[in-house]
Image (cartoon, rainbow, N blue to C red):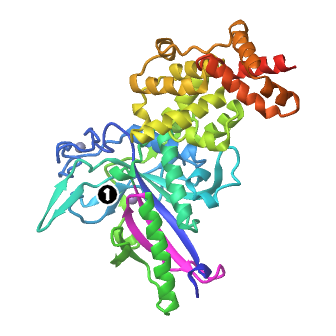
Amino acid sequence: MPVADYIPTIGLEIHVHLKTRSKMFCACATSYGDDPNTRTCPTCLGLPGALPVLNEEAIKMTILTGQLLGAVTPEFCKWDRKNYFYADMPKNYQISQYDQPLVVGGRIPLYDQYFPKHQRGGAGADGVLATVPLTRIHLEEDAGKSTHFGTSSGLDYNRAGTPLMEIVTDPAISTADEAAALLASLRQILVYAGVSDADMERGQMRCDVNVSVRKSAAEPLGAKIELKNINSVAAVRRAIVFEIERQCGELDRGLAQRQETRRWDDERGESTDMRGKEDAHDYRYFPDPDLQPVCTTQWLNEVRSRLPELPHALRARFGHDYGLTPYDAGVLTSEPALAAYFEEAAAGSSKAKSVANWIINELLGRLNEGQTDFSANPVSAAALRELVDLVEGGGISGAQAKEVFSEMFATGGAPAAIVQARGFSQVSDTGALDGFVQQVLAANPDLVARIQAGEAKVVNVLVGQVMKASGGKANPKRVSELLAQALG
Ligand code: ZN
Ligand code: MN
């Protein structure tokens, strides 16, 4: 039967590096790009006798994430050893949480802007198109990193012991697009919450994908195939599309599916057999005797008192407070620094919509051209507001404003100084403009006659002539008004 007739079921396990200064169970600094094995100590190297000490900040960040996603933090959580052997994990076990995690339940909102264009629409002012239920969120430690060179391998333990938050969704996702939108939305939420930079390229967010297919909703879920450690949203999307087709093809040929772990090779665009998937009992989980269970009450109260505003709440507020369209609000909330910049520039301006347009069309356009991100923005919020006030107040023309903006972007200069240096003031004064208007009317009796005969559009020709006579300095809106008065 065709692929479209099968029902796919997808669940994600997402590992996120928390943005703490030190590691999960020792005082070593968390780091990226340092020389190998320069951020280690007996604890994160797993030397005998070294004892773990909990990182409170990591616990608070995990509870915070749960609160933001509407989840529950039980009163107690505990720590377990997940036993397996691998060279990048010298203790031969990972400290994780098995049956008493920090966070249970919750839902991840999927943002409209992260779906392909044809699937968007139907979201409210907050841009939330759907939500996906979560099973749990627990805290554990990352392993070191192996690099394989031909006949030998290198091991770097700088990453070993980095706080790792694992977010597990219910098997409630049905398309690759939905999975991709979930990852992009989650990343945005984690960045807003300040708990992670969640940069997939740097391995700060990695995703395991579980996929199964079945022929009808009446059947139980099919055998779960797990694809490990995929490190980009695009690769997750490709892996899911491939895996659904592969499993449907096998079922079509009458091949029974069995639970297994497969490796996704993004360059070749295919998954290959890795190992039969172990069950939980293969890891021989048991409570870590070096760590006490944790009572969460105090941290939960602390976290609840300072919940940050999430991107979807901000989008709804931008629509309501500034009259922005959902699209504009979506662009301006794509990162916290940009949203704060817009609010600063729009504060006290009656032209918030115009401020939004200048940021989206001119500022972000130029930053894109230069392939720089928003942190490199040379235009202060106050300068942008001043520029918008100048154009909207008729002090300079739209075309002049674009030139002024170019110079502000290049030099970081103030709009008023640039306007003055270039002699860009716009003439709105009636006395000064009246002379030009009379002069143009006298020189064009034929056009005046056509306007009076009902050809209203011809007035634009006269506006152009007045602009020309003024050397481009007349305020075109004011000129139109004066011509309309003169022509009665
Ligand atoms: Zn250490
Ligand atoms: Mn894990």
256 vs 146: above or below: below
Magenta stretch? 206-232
Residue shown at 87% from the left, 33% from the top: 454
Residue 168 highlighted magenta (yes or no): no
Foreground pick, 388 / 348: 388
Q: Amino acid at mark 1?
A: Gln
- Dividing the image into 4 quarters, which one contains the N terminus? bottom right
- Dividing the image into 4 quarters, which one contains the C terminus? top right
Residue shown at 50% from the left, 76% from the top: 244
Residue shown at 84% from the left, 27% from the top: 449
Q: Which residue is mark 1?
A: 94
Would you say the beta carbon of the disc 1 residue lies within 8 angstroms of ligand 2?
Answer: yes
Image location (x, y in percent) of residue 356: 60, 32
Q: Tell me the crowding category of disc 1: few under 14, some 14 to 19, or many 20 or more residues within 10 angstroms, Cα based.
A: many
358 vs 240: above or below: above
Residue shown at 38% from the left, 47% from the top: 292
Quarter residue 283 falls in: bottom left
Residue 189 appears anywhere in the view: yes
338 vs 170: above or below: above
Q: Looking at this rendering, what residue extends furthest in the left direction?
A: 151
Foreground pick, 78 / 62: 62
Image location (x, y in percent) of residue 20: 36, 39
Image location (x, y in percent) of residue 193: 50, 39
